[in-house]
Image (spheres, helix red, strand yellow):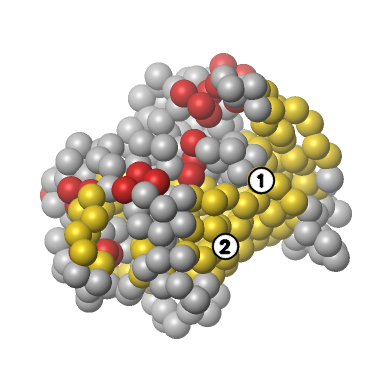
């Protein structure tokens, strides 16, 4: 474990970067601002170690940025229609920051705050635990939420993310991790040649504002069918209404076998490097976002301008707008209960 100063916030507080290195030489770097993964270095099929997540060279890039590179987002990852929901007969208005809707926790979500850090005792693998207290009324949400996120870089080349949260009032909680992956080893390469497989037969169609209609639609005979490994670029520009709404893929897939247990959710393969990322989770949904709003304005590592579709997100979570959809798996967290989530990004080659 290595701790270094990454930068300083405008109020003078230091932001630190923590470097985790496992026995295989893979490296994960995490800063306490936004509980953000800034770098994830894993081998290709020839053993060449390269970074596979988009990000920024400086703290200011994360402070000013709007793309959520590598961060933990919340309280509610994804969208809530009109920023409004009802809980126990009370209507709540949370901040609106995505057109008419609420996205990824609002104007100052979990990605824009400084987390407290501790190093877990007794872990056989390099690990870091980050803790944030979200006060009652923050961004309009009820209840004071205490959320802990633990990153572990295992000896099996897994980045494991464990979440644990409590609240002193009824609230909704749906955090997720928002790394943009590019397994090619070069952030100038588009991700359209990556091949993706999702363990899902259904997805949640959206309206023009990317809010679910409430339908669970079959993926069969649509461009949303990733039941077997499929190049992302194969159908991404098809004249299909859902793709037009998202300017590509920006949708939630209904994962099979939801029971609260960890199981495979997706597999991502990049042919030129041979890198494979298998995603495992205990969550009901997976949001696949194909980097449609990257436009070259965000300058990233080594001054690279992140162009259209040069990174993709696979966000494990509850479904979008669940607080307004009682038929979706619940995101309600009540006092005395504990929110738990585990997601694993497992790296291998072929």
Looking at the figure, which quarter contains the N terminus?
A: top right
Q: Position of residue 96 (x, y in %)?
A: 25, 40
Q: Residue furthest top?
A: 303
Q: Can residue 204 be seen in the rendering of this structure?
A: no
Tell me if residue 216 comes above or below residue 2 in the rendering.
below
Q: Position of residue 87 (x, y in %)?
A: 25, 67
Label 2: how many residues lie within 10 Å, few (<14), some (14-19) or many (20+)?
Answer: many
Query: 74 or 226, which is in the foreground?
Result: 74
Label 1: how many residues lie within 10 Å, few (<14), some (14-19) or many (20+)?
Answer: some
What is the secondary structure assignment of the residue under circle 1? strand
Residue 150, quarter of the rendered image: bottom right
The residue positioned 72% from the left and 35% from the top of the image is 17
Q: CA distance from mark 2 to mark 1?
A: 14 Å
Query: 286 or 6, which is in the foreground?
Result: 6
Query: 145 or 42, which is in the foreground?
Result: 145
Which residue is disc 2 drawn over? Answer: 163
Mark toward the viewer: 2 or 1 = 1
What is the secondary structure assignment of the residue under circle 2? strand
Which residue is disc 1 drawn over? Answer: 116
The residue positioned 17% from the left and 41% from the top of the image is 100
Left or right of 73 in this view: 60: right
Q: Position of residue 44 (x, y in %)?
A: 69, 46
Left or right of 14 in this view: 196: left
Residue 18, quarter of the rendered image: top right
The residue positioned 32% from the left and 48% from the top of the image is 140
Left or right of 106 in this view: 335: right
């Amino acid at each position: 474990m290595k701790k270094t100063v990454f930068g300083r916030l405008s109020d003078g507080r230091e932001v630190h970067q923590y470097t985790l290195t496992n026995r295989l030489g893979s490296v994960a770097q995490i800063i306490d601002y936004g509980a953000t993964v800034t770098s994830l270095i894993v081998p290709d099929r020839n053993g060449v170690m390269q970074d596979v997540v988009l990000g920024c060279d400086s703290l200011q890039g994360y402070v000013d940025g709007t793309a959520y590179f590598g961060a933990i987002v919340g309280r509610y990852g994804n969208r809530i229609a009109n920023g409004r929901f009802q809980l126990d007969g009370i209507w709540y208005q949370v901040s609106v920051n995505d057109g008419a809707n609420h996205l990824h926790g609002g104007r100052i979500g979990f990605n824009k705050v400084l987390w407290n850090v501790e190093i877990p005792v007794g872990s056989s693998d390099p690990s870091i635990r980050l803790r944030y207290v979200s006060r009652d009324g923050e961004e309009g949400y009820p209840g004071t939420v205490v959320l802990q996120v633990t990153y572990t870089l295992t000896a099996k080349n897994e980045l494991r993310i464990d979440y644990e949260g409590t609240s002193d009032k009824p609230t909704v909680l749906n955090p997720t991790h928002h790394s943009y992956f590019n397994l090619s080893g070069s952030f100038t390469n588009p991700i359209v040649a990556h091949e993706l497989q999702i363990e899902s037969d259904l997805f949640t169609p959206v309206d023009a504002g990317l809010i679910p209609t409430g339908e669970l639609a079959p993926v069969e005979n649509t461009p949303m069918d990733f039941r077997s490994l499929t190049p992302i670029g194969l159908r991404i520009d098809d004249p299909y209404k859902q793709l037009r709404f998202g300017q590509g893929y920006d949708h939630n897939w209904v994962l099979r076998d939801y029971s609260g247990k960890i199981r495979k959710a997706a597999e991502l393969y990049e042919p030129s490097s041979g890198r494979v990322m298998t995603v495992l989770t205990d969550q009901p949904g997976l949001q696949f976002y194909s980097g449609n709003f990257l436009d070259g304005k965000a300058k990233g590592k080594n001054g690279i301008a992140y162009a259209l579709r040069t990174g993709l997100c696979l966000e494990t979570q509850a479904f979008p707008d669940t607080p307004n959809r009682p038929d979706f798996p619940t995101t309600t967290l009540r006092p005395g209960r504990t929110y738990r989530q585990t997601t694993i990004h497992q790296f291998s080659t072929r």
